[in-house]
Amino acid sequence: MIFRDVVSWTSMISAYGMGSQGKDAVALFEKMRDSGFTPDWIAFVSVLAACSHAGLVDEGRNCFNLMAEYGITPGIEHYNCMVDLLGRAGKIDEAYHLTRQMPMEPNERVWVSSEQSGYYVLLSNIYAKAGRWQDVETVRSIMSSKGIKKIPGNSNVEINGHVYTFLAGDQSHTQSKEIYKELDVLVGRMKELGYMPETDSALHDVEEEDKECHLAVHSEKLAIVFAILNTKPGSTIRITKNIRVCGDCHVAAKLISKIAD
């Protein structure tokens, strides 16, 4: 890029954040500062959001505290990012304490909205990450009593002009047997390369072995294997999702791209 300004730097930071490359986003933020550019209000939102998505608690705290050096007063968006970051990291008490310190009235992104399922799911996942399973059940009971349903995550892959959709543990496809057989082979080869399932991504109150089973059949893994079975070797495979890719699937996708013929 020949011409750089705060907007272009911020755009790249945001892109890294949305691509689950939080450390790269933070590194670029620091490079922007080292290059003499002054981060603005939006730049801080972008880097804090990147920290939140990547679970970079210390980096997020540092960036949040850095705002004062630039004379920027944190707004509701910055607090939202920090509460989300702390909550995702299982630091519920710290997130609540920060919420109580906010100089403005918290909005529905901080407190759970009474209508949108996504906020309830996020809160449930935060509790699950912290191992607070009774609280998970409480949130789910509230959702049930209010008639709020979780939108199931799905992964889509297009092959020969047709879009195929997969859910976690999906066995509705005609090639399900082949998909699961090939997936077992790929998981074995990944483990030979040092792959260790990130069981923290399995937000279920079950044993570690069962968590691995849940992770193994996430929709993106099924979609990837289906595409491998139905495309020529070396073909580009693009998976789209309606929710974020979990950390384990992110690692698995990179390993599969290395070992798939």
Image: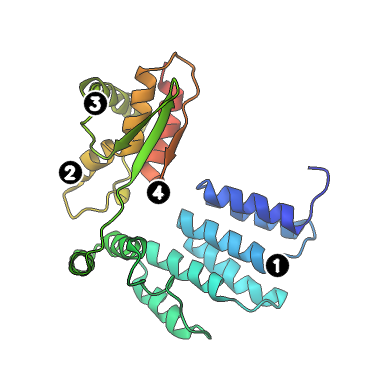
Disc number for residue 180: 3
Q: Where is residue 141 in the image (x, y as percent from the top left)?
A: 18, 67
Label 4 to label 3: alpha-carbon separation: 23 Å
Q: Which of marks 4 and 3 is nearer the N terminus?
A: 3
Q: What residue type is labelled 2?
A: Asp
Mark found first going from the N terminus, 1 or 2: 1
Between label 1 and label 2, give the one nearer the viewer.
Answer: 1
First in sequence: mark 2 vs mark 4? 2
What residue appears at the point 38 percent right and 78 percent down from the top-left corner?
Answer: 96
Q: What element carries label 2?
A: helix
Residue 46 visible here: yes
User: Residue placed farthest to the top in the image?
Assistant: 232
Q: Name the residue under label 1.
A: 40
Q: Mark 2 points at which residue?
A: 210
| Circles 1 and 3 in contact, beta carbons < 8 Å | no
Residue at 24 percent across and 35 percent down: it is 170
Would residue 31 be visible to someone looking at this image?
no
Q: Do the residues labelled 4 and 3 touch (CB within 8 Å)?
A: no
Instruction: Label 3, secondary structure: give it.
Output: helix
